[in-house]
Amino acid sequence: MRAVWAIAANTFREAVRDRVLYLFIGFAVVMVVSSKLFGMLTVGNETKIIKDIGLAAMQFFSMLIAVMMSMILISREVDSRTVFNILAKPVRRWQFILGKYLGLVLIVAANLVLITFVLMLTVLVAAGELDLMLLFAGAMTMLEMLVLAAFATLFAVLTRPILGSLMTLAVFVVGHMSADLWLLTRQLPGALTRAVIAVVYYLLPNLERFNFRTEVVHDLAIPGAAAGWAGLYAIAFVVVVLFLANLRFRGKDLK
Amino acid sequence: MKRTFGTFAVITILLGAVVLSEVRLGGITREDPLGRELLYLPSPEMLRIMSLGNPGLVADVLYLWSIQYYSFYRPHERFLYLETVYNLITDLDPLYVDAYRIGALIMQIQTGGDQNEIDAAVRRLFDKGLHNLPDDWQLAEAAAWDFYIRFKDRETALHYAEIATQRPGAPPRIKRMVGVWRDKESAWTLDDSIEYWRRALEDAENEWDSVLCMNQFYDAVTARDRKKLEPLLEAFITHYGICPASWEDLIQAGALRQVPLDAFGDPYGIGLEDCGLVAYKKFKNQ
């Protein structure tokens, strides 16, 4: 496990040195803070607007970081041939993949912690309210990003960097629309068609399962089971996708 | 050094050109075939999908836009697609209280167009809000006051006020409001009114509420007693040609069994000038 952590820490350090990351984080922080200005334009509840914008920024910029990092996650190691140095040591390929994945997760988590903190501070200043539910929304966005980062890792192994990023972006978009696929199974005629669509639905992540933003913004009760099952759903998806990534990477000719 | 200065000068000149062109462009009036017309409003389903899990944010953007957009209109104009826009916002975020409230307010500002249609549209928006927010009494109260003041539609106002009283957390003042409106509208019998205020008195949460409810209860009881006793006083005058000096005269004449008491348990008086029933609540409160 030490090897995994060493690779994760190194991936994190490498990303921290990347200026693009700061650009994204800077944009996210500016967007959250400027939500106060949008709030001032409204008639009524200003805090709702701040929370809506802040939570959307949290999700959007975390996704962008995951997509961007997937471009450099493995290809940089392969292109610069440093992957051979790593794999020449007693490091197995699955450890390399897992380390890279955890490194990406650390980057996204650091970004999420920062944005959540800034958002909580903005809400505190604007409304005088310390909303701890924003932490919950941040945690749920993290679950969503765990799944997305797993797909980013898979695509980084499967294909070229730019295509991999586009595919990760596609998973994000489709993941938020997949619930409509399920609705489609109810409306389409023919048991076989419905079954095929149902299979596609289960194979794709339903990222809306991690979306509790409405509940957080409107102070609604959140069933504990929903959060618990969402956690299990995310972990199961991550394990499956990383297993596939490892399978591909194990047989990959790196030369 | 010369080169740096030259570069700086070029950049400054170019920035100046940018500002100048922007100012000039802003000053040119152009044909605007679109005007203020809305050409395309996407469906809420489409927007929900496109929001990628942030329909609340899209609702906020539309709401902020709508406030700006409708501020271009004058009250005598017909506001375009107002109901459609606010339906869109509230479909995206059905719990957006401000959208129902402000949407209804903007609709009410219009003095042009078919007022009955505007009235119906406001009702539809409030009904949608009350359906989506089953625990919200503030929206129901706002609807009640809007119909009471703006549309002078007291029946509808009463309907929304009654909904407000049934919502959890509704303050006792709304119950009082319903009672007063019902009394004014004579929408119920005096016995209904007495029963209503008796219950409101039981539910009063503080002394202030209790005093206010007691006043209303007293008035309702007095109104009922007045209806019963004043015909007796009139009959006495008709028979004896004078106003009775006290209730004892009526008891002796066989019209009453005992001295009538008010809601506080104190005897009513008889007015010297009009020979009507006198309730002493005011004296008691002073």
Image: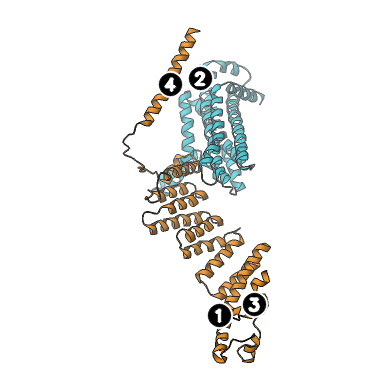
Chain colours: A cyan, B orange
User: Residue under circle 2?
Assistant: A253
SS assignment at label 2:
loop
Going by the numbered disc 1, the residue's amino acid type is Lys
Q: Earlier in the sequence, mark 1 or mark 3?
A: 1
Question: What's the CA distance linking mark 4 and mark 2?
Answer: 57 Å
Between circles 4 and 2, the one closer to the viewer is 4
Confirm whether circles 2 and 3 share one chain: no
Residue found at x 47% / y 52%: B105
Q: Earlier in the sequence, mark 1 or mark 4?
A: 4
In which image quadrant can residue A240 be found? top right
Crowd tier of the residue under label 1, counting other residues whose Cα lies within 10 Å: few below 14, some 14–19, many 20 or above: few
SS assignment at label 4:
helix
Dot 2: chain letter: A
User: Residue under circle 1?
Assistant: B227
User: Residue under circle 3?
Assistant: B262
Say which mark, if any, is on residue B114.
none
**Is residue A121 rendered to the left or right of residue B96?**
right
Between circles 2 and 3, the one closer to the viewer is 3
Between circles 2 and 1, the one closer to the viewer is 1
